[in-house]
Image: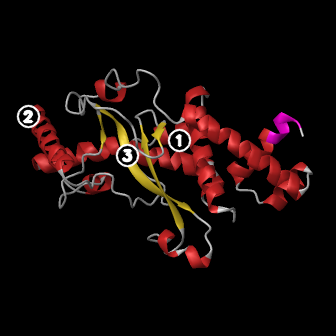
């Protein structure tokens, strides 16, 4: 099998969620050959992920242009480098091991935590970014309106808490749009085959790496273009957020509370 055919088969399986039998028919190879070369490419792309799923060098030296060029966010969020959240990916787990994987929809899922920048590149699949700048780990004020549709249906934000929540929700929508592009492109994430769980984890890593590679190198891409046309934060219904990245204990919570209050005061001052 040529390298081009191997790559084409690999991308076909990820992009269309093709079963082994479908790949056999499409590429005219045995099931064993399909499985073997898919596994080889999966390991190769996962190794590529080490270099692709990370911030570019000097990426955090300057304020992101998405904030710098928008008076709604500048200078209040000048130290923000991106957003962080969790997303569910369908998992296939044996019945005896399913309980820890059962999500809100009552089916087994792989709970994935990720951070992205404002260019919709995934910075980390485990949120372990060593930086003294802020991702949007600062949670919204609870008990107040937060989601953008809530503001579109009602009156404009009122008071410092709602003003902060509105700006926060607008910025944070980038992670939801990033998840939307990622899951829409790779159908295998929505209908995971019954691979061993370790292989399912590799598929998540590999598709994130390919997501970033496409974002860095493609001049145009229909999935990213569609997402950029939707800047109001409309999310794919399949994206279910459960991991609350803002829930932290101890001194960090107090630090984030103080920072949130300072940003809210700055937002109110600029709108006065």
The residue at which mark 1 appears reads as 226
Q: In the drawing, does residue 77 fall left or right of residue 89? A: left
The reply to whether the C-beta atoms of the residues labelled 3 and 2 are less than 8 Å apart is no
Asked which quadrant contains residue 241, the reply is bottom left
Asked which quadrant contains residue 31, the reply is bottom right
Residue 269, label in figure = 2
Tell me the magenta residue range. Answer: 2-6
Q: Residue 98's spot in the image, x, y percent?
A: 54, 74
Please report the residue visible at 36 percent of the width from the left and 42 percent of the height from the top: 83
**Label 1 environment density (alpha carbons within 10 Å; few <14, some 14–19, many ≥20):** few
In depth, the one of 109 and 162 nearer the eye is 109
Q: Quadrant of the C terminus?
A: top left
- The Cα–Cα distance between marks 2 and 1, rounded to whole angstroms, is 35 Å
The residue at which mark 3 appears reads as 84
Instruction: Inspect this view and state whether residue 21 appears.
Output: yes
Q: Residue 134's spot in the image, x, y percent?
A: 28, 36
In depth, the one of 189 and 157 nearer the eye is 189
Please report the residue visible at 56 percent of the width from the left and 28 percent of the height from the top: 216
Please report the residue visible at 42 percent of the width from the left and 54 percent of the height from the top: 86
Q: Quadrant of the N terminus?
A: top right
Q: How are the residues colored?
A: secondary structure
Residue 32 in the magenta stretch? The answer is no
Q: Residue 64's spot in the image, x, y percent?
A: 35, 26
- The Cα–Cα distance between marks 3 and 2, rounded to whole angstroms, is 27 Å
Q: Tell us which disc is closer to us: 2 or 1.
A: 2
| Labels 3 and 2: the sequence-earlier one | 3
Relative height, residue 16 to residue 70 (above, below): below
């Amino acid at each position: 099998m040529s390298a081009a055919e191997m790559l084409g088969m690999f991308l076909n399986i990820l992009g269309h969620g093709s079963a082994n039998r479908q790949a056999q028919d499409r590429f005219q190879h045995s099931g064993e050959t399909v499985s073997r070369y898919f596994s080889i490419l999966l390991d190769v792309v996962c190794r590529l992920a080490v270099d692709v799923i990370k911030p570019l060098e000097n990426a955090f030296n300057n304020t992101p242009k998405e904030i710098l060029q928008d008076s709604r966010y500048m200078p209040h969020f000048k130290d923000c480098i991106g957003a962080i959240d969790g997303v569910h990916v369908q998992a296939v787990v044996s019945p005896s091991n399913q309980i820890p994987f059962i999500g809100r929809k009552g089916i087994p899922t792989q709970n994935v935590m990720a951070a992205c920048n404002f260019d919709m590149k995934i910075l980390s699949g485990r949120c372990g970014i060593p930086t003294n700048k802020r991702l949007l780990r600062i949670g919204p004020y609870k008990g107040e309106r937060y989601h953008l549709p809530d503001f579109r249906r009602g009156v404009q934000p009122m008071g410092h808490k709602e003003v902060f929540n509105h700006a926060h929700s607008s910025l944070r929508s980038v992670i939801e749009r990033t998840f939307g592009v990622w899951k829409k492109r790779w159908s295998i994430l929505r209908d995971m085959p019954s691979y061993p769980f370790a292989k399912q984890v590799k598929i998540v890593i590999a598709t994130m790496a390919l997501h970033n590679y496409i974002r860095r190198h493609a001049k145009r891409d229909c999935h990213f273009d569609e997402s950029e046309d939707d800047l109001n934060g409309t999310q794919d219904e399949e994206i279910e957020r459960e991991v609350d990245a803002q829930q932290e204990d101890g001194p960090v919570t107090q630090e984030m509370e103080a920072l949130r209050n300072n940003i809210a005061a700055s937002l109110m001052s600029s709108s006065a």
